[in-house]
Image (cartoon, rainbow, N blue to C red):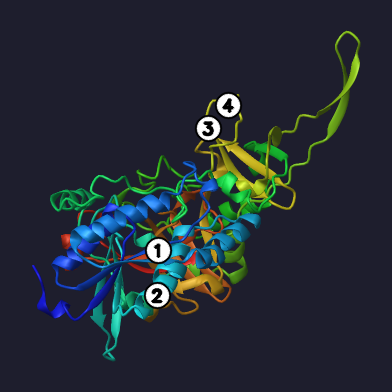
Amino acid sequence: MKNSNNKDIKVCIGLSGGVDSSVAALLLKQQGYDVFALFMQNWHDASTTLHGDCEWEEDRFVAELVARKIGIPFYFVDLSEEYRKRVVDYMFDEYEKGRTPNPDVLCNREIKFDAFLKCAVKMGADMVATGHYCRKVVETAEDGSPVYRILAGADPNKDQSYFLCQLTQDQLSKALFPIGDIPKPEVRRLAAEADLPSAEKKDSQGICFVGKVDLPTFLQQKLKPCEGDVVEVYDAYYTENEQYNFVRNTLESIMADSDAQLKMITDYISEDKASTVVRDGAVANGCPWSMEAIAALSDDQLYQLAQPVKYDIKFETETYRSGRKHIKKTRYKENPYGKIVGKHDGAQFYTIGQRKGLNIGGHKDSIFVIETDIPDNIIYVGEGHTHKGLSRSCLRIDPSEIHWIREDMKMAVGEIRRYRVRIRYRQPLQDATLIMRENGLYILFDQPQRGITSGQFAVWYNPLGESKEASDSLHKDTSVEMIGSGVI
């Protein structure tokens, strides 16, 4: 149904050629907004995509057909230079440092809701709309100013609030998310009902606006391959490791129940299965930590608690004679802490938790990357989901990297709060304690987490309780509001 109050609001829809933005445009038109479509090209180089063709040209063609079908003006803008400088170059720089960035988060912060938004405003737009699965709510603060809240999308399988975790109140003031309260199957149905050309189009995959790529090939545009060792770490390494023992002892000292058994290894199975048992938005057995004991930890103790285990396994060689001719050869001596099990093309091409692309056989369980040593070009790996090197319970966010979507809810130094957190897009929300200190924001999870990776974004959410938004939600993980985020 059209709203006559909307006809004076000019909205620019970022039309990508996909079904989500197409239905978003359709709904805006039906709601009476003055809508125009703007397609942005952010990538030129087809040599890095798996298909080897210009996918953006096909996307633009479909987007233009959709705009024509809906009956809205269609425009084109080339933002590829901005995208290269503000997203791709940042990616290369982070990978070179051994960190794993999230280009989709950067694209929303730097391109869609900055460069693209500015372009749309110059063309007369009052608002910018996208096909993200999230919900925006506007409230009024005590001083009369508006407060923009981002709630998880209503579809638990498609909530995309994580990708918007770096937006500001100013950016949100000009944003619309028309499909945030609609399940994906309903979006497909609406597209088919309206006979939109994108109705059957598959969802895009890969790096935002670059497409589905082979990441090592993509990174090798600027990062040179360099052969190094792959070292498997054995369980014995942790027995005497100072950092691992410090973490274990510190966690034991802050447990609310001194008789309870500390967990150091996650129950992780996959991103579709939570590693904690959740009932009504809370850990079934309650928070395992004592808030008083956490508050008593010094800044230095918290800093060390959040540090990953570092690996320094030295291998000595020995000579031996082999074969009938007793040819002299060299081999590594057996080491109780680990073994060199293969070679790699560059530590900067790998990330913690990765198991594909290692090409290491002879193991019963999968092999995972547990650490990348960029200066020495070494990859450390461990066997199995339960390897000690895959799990951590605490992470730190540098003060310069803390971002509050809800600026009115910033934590003061010394403050401790309970939030629900995710460190990857598809990860089920995890219960955690946030501790603000002078030297950073610390996130202490109730349960160990698999594959905490520097460079990724940790995002914290506040449960909505018994609000209308919560009662209307389809799933517990959608009954939350995104409060802030930070780079791990």
Instruction: Find disc 3 in the rendering and name its residue.
Output: 366
Q: CA distance from mark 2 to mark 3?
A: 47 Å
Q: Residue visible at 56% across and 57% down?
A: 454
Instruction: Find disc 2 in the rendering and name its residue.
Output: 119
Query: Of label 2 and label 4, which has the lower sequence position?
Result: 2
Does 309 sit above or below residue 466?
above
Q: Give percent across and percent down for residue 201.
A: 29, 46
Instruction: Find disc 1 in the rendering and name its residue.
Output: 40
Instruction: Find disc 4 in the rendering and name its residue.
Output: 363
User: Is residue 235 at all visible to an observer of this figure?
Assistant: yes
The amino acid on which the numbered mark 2 sits, given as a three-letter code, is: Cys
Q: Is residue 77 left or right of residue 133?
A: right
User: Is residue 406 at all visible to an observer of this figure?
Assistant: no
The amino acid on which the numbered mark 3 sits, given as a three-letter code, is: Ser
Quadrant assignment, res 39: bottom left
Badge 4 density bin: few <14, some 14–19, many ≥20, Cα 10 Å: few
Q: CA distance from mark 1 to mark 4?
A: 47 Å
Q: Give percent across and percent down for residue 367.
A: 56, 34
